[in-house]
Image: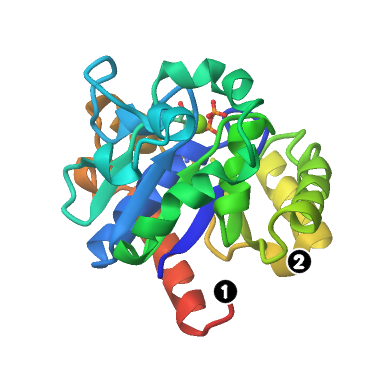
Amino acid sequence: MAKVIAVTNQKGGVGKTTTVINLAAALAIAEMRILVIDTDAQANCTSGLGVIKGSLKKSIYDSLINSEPLFSIMLSTDLENLKLIPADKNLTGAGVEMIDLPDREFLLKRLLTPIVDQFDFILIDSPPSLNILTLNGLVAADSVLVPIQCEYFALEGLTDLFDTLARIRKAFNPNLSVQGILLTMFDERTNLSTQVREDLINHFAGQMMQTVIPRNVRLAEAPSFGKPIILYDIRSKGAESYIRLAKEILNHEKKGTG
Ligand SMILES: Nc1ncnc2c1ncn2[C@@H]1O[C@H](COP(=O)(O)OP(=O)(O)OP(=O)(O)O)[C@@H](O)[C@H]1O
Ligand SMILES: [Mg+2]
């Protein structure tokens, strides 16, 4: 049965999509069977994995709104072990359409049930808000991985997110755990990065991922080629860091502490 990890932070541009794409690819080359689910109308994860926007016939929108089974919209990627449930801009209005659906918080969880055994990990990319799509991801997930950009306001909003997680546990998903807080775009040459890291360690000691993702231009370039970093530049610092993150998560799961 797959471990389902939602990659979530309501702040925009903190590295959620970059983390989903590259963690998924690193786990896939470690011979894990991986499914990526894009729940963001921006569909950056979909295009970053090489799917040309506009070429899609169906997306997760059709599953959420019209109960289309996930296996019928699942796509292959350049990596054999990595499958994708794509998003498209139809998702923009999905929140409003979902209001009248019964158990609208559980739609994604239910859709996953028939395919959850086919994968080792399912990674969910979330939009930059706490909307009903994000909520569906967090209700379907076993754990949440929270990317944090090393910038001045990094900690702001984290308290909101943790409050939201507490409410989700109470109302919908008592077993939702925190996989970890992941520092992204870290630049060891700046005092700010170091300061943010220290603040986070002080506040959230036990919940920090050991792996830190450095700022690396190759990570920013790869999506425009529709490739994860390991297929674009495997020797880059960015590729190395996501391979390390995959190992950290695999070791954690092996110990059975996840
Ligand atoms: N480690 C990194 N080094 C350099 N650039 C990065 C890194 N991580 C992400 N970026 C770049 O920063 C921008 C934001 O990253 P990304 O799209 O992954 O964030 P996001 O949280 O998914 O954003 P959104 O909230 O809009 O969905 C992108 O242009 C991405 O290429
Ligand atoms: Mg994104």
Q: Identify the element where label 1 is drawn.
A: loop
Q: Nearer the viewer, residue 187 or 147?
A: 147
Give the quarter of the figure containing the C terminus.
bottom right
Classify 10 Å Cα crowding around label 1: few (below 14), some (14-19), many (20 and above): some
Q: Is residue 232 above or below residue 29?
A: above
Q: Nearer the viewer, residue 178 or 133?
A: 133
Residue labelled with disc 2: 205
Which of the 4 image quadrants contains residue 212?
Answer: bottom right
The answer to whether residue 186 is visible is no
Give the quarter of the figure containing the N terminus.
bottom left
Image coords of residue 11 (percent x, y): 67, 32
Give me the C-alpha separation between circle 2 and circle 1.
17 Å
Q: Residue at x 47, y 33 (%)?
A: 64
Q: Is residue 236 above or below residue 224?
A: below
Image coords of residue 24 (percent x, y): 36, 52
Q: Nearer the viewer, residue 165 or 148?
A: 165
Q: Residue at x 83, y 58 (%)?
A: 203
| Beta carbon of the mark 1 residue lies under 8 A of ligand 1 | no
The answer to whether residue 178 is visible is yes
Q: Identify the element where label 2 is drawn.
A: helix
Residue labelled with disc 1: 258
Q: Residue at x 42, y 72 (%)?
A: 250
Marks 2 and 1: which is nearer the front?
Answer: 1
Q: Is residue 15 above or below residue 194?
A: above
- The answer to whether the residue labelled 2 contacts the one labelled 1, judged by CB atoms less than 8 Å apart, is no
**Which numbered disc covers residue 249?**
none
Q: Amino acid at mark 1?
A: Gly
Classify 10 Å Cα crowding around label 2: few (below 14), some (14-19), many (20 and above): few
Image coords of residue 237 (percent x, y): 37, 50
Q: Residue at x 45, y 82 (%)?
A: 254
